[in-house]
Amino acid sequence: MELTEASTEDRILEAAMKVFTRKGFAAARTEEIAKEAGINRALLHYYYRDKHTIFNLIFETRFKEFFKGLFVIFESDNISLFEKIERMVNHEITTLIKHPHLARFVITEIAQQPELLLEHGAKLGINPRLLISEFEKQVNAEIKLGTIRPIQGRQLLINIMSLCIYPFVASPVIQTMMSLQEKEFYEMTEQRKRLVSDFIINSIKK
Amino acid sequence: MELTEASTEDRILEAAMKVFTRKGFAAARTEEIAKEAGINRALLHYYYRDKHTIFNLIFETRFKEFFKGLFVIFESDNISLFEKIERMVNHEITTLIKHPHLARFVITEIAQQPELLLEHGAKLGINPRLLISEFEKQVNAEIKLGTIRPIQGRQLLINIMSLCIYPFVASPVIQTMMSLQEKEFYEMTEQRKRLVSDFIINSIKK
DNA sequence: CATTTGTTTAACAATATTGTTAATTCTATA
DNA sequence: TATAGAATTAACAATATTGTTAAACAAATG
């Protein structure tokens, strides 16, 4: 039984995904995308108007992957703070293991074209501020109960994200400095699913 | 008493510092650097051979700033682990408040040209692996003494770096999502000098 | 003040990158 | 199998970006 090979149109998208994600918009060359897809550069303009058109498709996909990861957790209501943190961490690290360049790509592109965040953010159908303030309420409630040490919700949130995301953003630096092969780096991040949860909970639990 | 205005040569470097740091090599335009320096683009080639020449000067400076921050702490021997962590965190966040784009610039450029890390790393005169293994020894000693919970030194190190560096790398995302003005973001990071130290130490202390 | 030296620019040249067109090949199907 | 339509390419055109040159200008120096 044969695998139906991907259409040219899709192969271009896949290739663009790879090249844009590892190089960013400015450094990506349409020539490289074409080569990666095994086609002529002209064909790329045949299916998609221009570089920007493809980039927007790619960015939209990546953008959703990245932020869905952040938000999917908040949706689940009636869950204890600790449980929520564990799920968040697990979900986030799992996503980033699958797409190791995702975070760096999204962040650096937004840094260069901040309007991307507002444009694509609107389509997301989610209000970050609302979610954040919900989270803050839950944190404050736990503090009042005396189950956790005092901390601002937003700072806790930043800590969680930092611990999950940074290792992937800085992976080229970390891998070199710690002499980690691809596989060792993977194992190290795999470990972090538990380690980071524990680290955070140990820190805030009274 | 007048301020001696900077020489053209220096103005070009300053301008290049700004433009390269916020855009990265690929997206930076020599035209923009020239404009920022208030000169003609040709003059930029008069003082510096080409775009790469200037970039290398800038990158070297930024690279040192970034890694010096990481290493300066390790040098201080005979200091308790907790003390060391506090100094590391304080030094790192202080540096990044001064140069908010530093980390993102260095990391993304290394991600695109990994050879930069080895080239410039050699000039640094420091052996990261040695420093890291020293740190691991100290962590293991504390674990054996029972003063801290068990954790791999390298994972602890990654946690420390993550908590310090990530907020700056992701600042455009964080600022927008949390609706923070420049000043509020600054205050938030300023708070983190203490908050992060405490967060880490609370987490590992038995 | 004539001359030399270094600074600056405008105009040009070269290269790199993107985008378009017209001709060719392939595929389905009448 | 002739043909319409889509897929593909080579060649070309346009644009963007970088790099060079020769000439103008300014400052120092004899």
Image (tube, coloured by chain):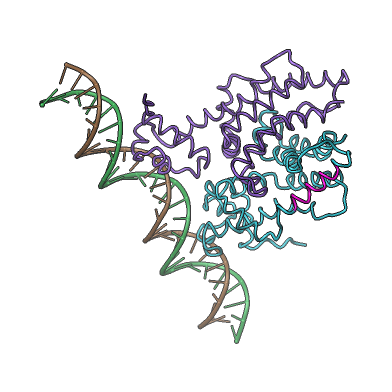
Chain colours: A purple, B cyan, C brown, D green
Q: Residue at x 39, y 33 (%)?
A: A49
Name the residue located 89 percent from the left edge and 42 percent from the top edge.
Answer: B145
* Residue drawn where x is 57% and y is 37% of the image: A101
- Residue B79 colored magenta? no
Front residue of B126 and B105: B126
**In x, y percent, where is residue A83?**
74, 20
What main secondary structure does the magenta stretch of the protein show? helix
Query: Is residue B39 shown above or below B26?
Result: below
Q: Nearer the viewer, residue A70 or B129?
A: B129
In the image, the segment drawn in magenta is B131-142
Residue A53, image x and y in percent?
A: 44, 32
Q: Quadrant of residue B192?
A: top right
Look at the image and say whether residue B141 sits in the magenta stretch: yes
The residue closer to the viewer here, A114 or C5, is A114
Does residue A185 appear to the left or right of C13 in the view shown?
A: right
Looking at the rendered image, the quarter that the C terminus of chain A falls into is: top right
Q: Is residue B21 left or right of residue B190?
A: left
How many numbered tags mark residues here? 0
Residue B75 percent across, percent down from the top left: 80, 55
Q: Position of residue B130 (x, y in %)?
A: 73, 54
